[in-house]
Image (tube, helix red, strand yellow):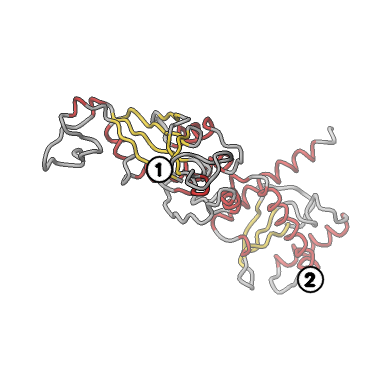
Amino acid sequence: MNTDEPINISRSAYHHLLWAMYLLSKKADLSQFRFYAKPGLVITIPEIDHIELSETGLHEVWINFGGIDGINGPLPLWLKEVLSQEYDDARQDSDKKRPLGDFINIFSHRLTYYLYRAWLKHKPFLMFDPLGKDRLSRLLLSLTHQMDIQDNNQSYISNKRLRFLPYVAALGNRSQSSNMLLGMLRHFFKGIPIHIKMFMKRFIDTPEEYQMCMGKRLDGNMILGQRMPDISGAFRIIVGPMKIDDYERFLPNGPYYKDLVHLVQMFVSQFLDWDIELRLLKKQIPRFEIGGKGNHSRLGFNTWLPPTNNHDGVIVIQKKN
């Protein structure tokens, strides 16, 4: 017989036991349980023999293997036989005590519990909290300074803690690139056309100490005028063309707008300026009507004067860091 066979069986049995402990943890706090190995010299199934309530109010979970006194435990066989006999006598006569077994169970419980903790440590998907408040999620969010997000919404679509978790690596990376930002935005707003136009021309204020004025020398870092052009410190996020429903979500009072601004501000350096260009499909531009019904008549945002057929359905929202 292959000498590895008992080890493989033991690993499989422990695997099922640990999963059973995980399911128990979903029903109650594991601190209310004590895991004791049922003394004996045979392996039986299932992994958990029975659960009983102790005099102290704790739930005693008796397992058919494991611990230090189980069939695969480190105790010598003669001591296991003594513990097995003591256990059987106590089961038949409730007045009999198990002093030796109770002492051994202290160590059996700790061994089983720490084995479970070690197993769970390497399965972060099991520790994941539906609200993103588990320890690993908090550590990841701390890399992007987002631990203070308080959102108890159970839906993944609207829970900000959960929606920002996939982008921790990008948001916490010191190396910032347009491709990384573009990929993050396209993934966040699935199905929405998004592009980034770099090197947008802008004018920046010239510091007063560098402005040319009477009494200063012409050489050095003197600049004529109070403003100067720059093409390296600004970019534009182009969203669309898109349908009217998606377009209105990206307007300043819409939910997509807040998420877009929040993501970009977390990613972009404070020294860069940027703006948002929203593009509405021409055939989706509503006609302007005074007192029109619904939200589809907002002058300057989704409808224009003169008639909308002469407009491209494009607006630019200025943003500055």
Q: Nearer the viewer, residue 227 or 284?
A: 227
Q: Identify the residue under disc 2.
A: 99
Q: Earlier in the sequence, mark 2 or mark 1?
A: 2
CB contact under 8 Å: marks 2 and 1: no
User: Looking at the picture, which amino acid does disc 1 mark?
Assistant: Lys
Q: Nearer the viewer, mark 2 or mark 1?
A: 1
Question: Which of the image's four quarters has the N terminus?
Answer: top right
x, y percent for residue 112: 72, 55
Kind of residue at disc 2: Pro
Q: Closest to the observer: 56 or 321?
A: 321
Q: Callout 2 environment at 10 Å: few (<14), some (14 to 19), or many (20+)?
A: few
Nearest the camera: 75 or 310? 310
Q: How many marks?
A: 2
Residue at 55 percent across and 43 percent down: it is 217
In the rendered view, tell whether residue 99 sits above or below residue 236: below
- Secondary element under disc 2, as helix, strand or loop, is helix
On the image, the x and y values in percent for residue 67 come to 76, 55
Q: Position of residue 96 (x, y in %)?
A: 74, 72
Q: Helix, strand, or loop for circle 1?
A: strand
Q: Is residue 193 above or below residue 24?
A: above
Tell me the number on the disc at residue 64.
none
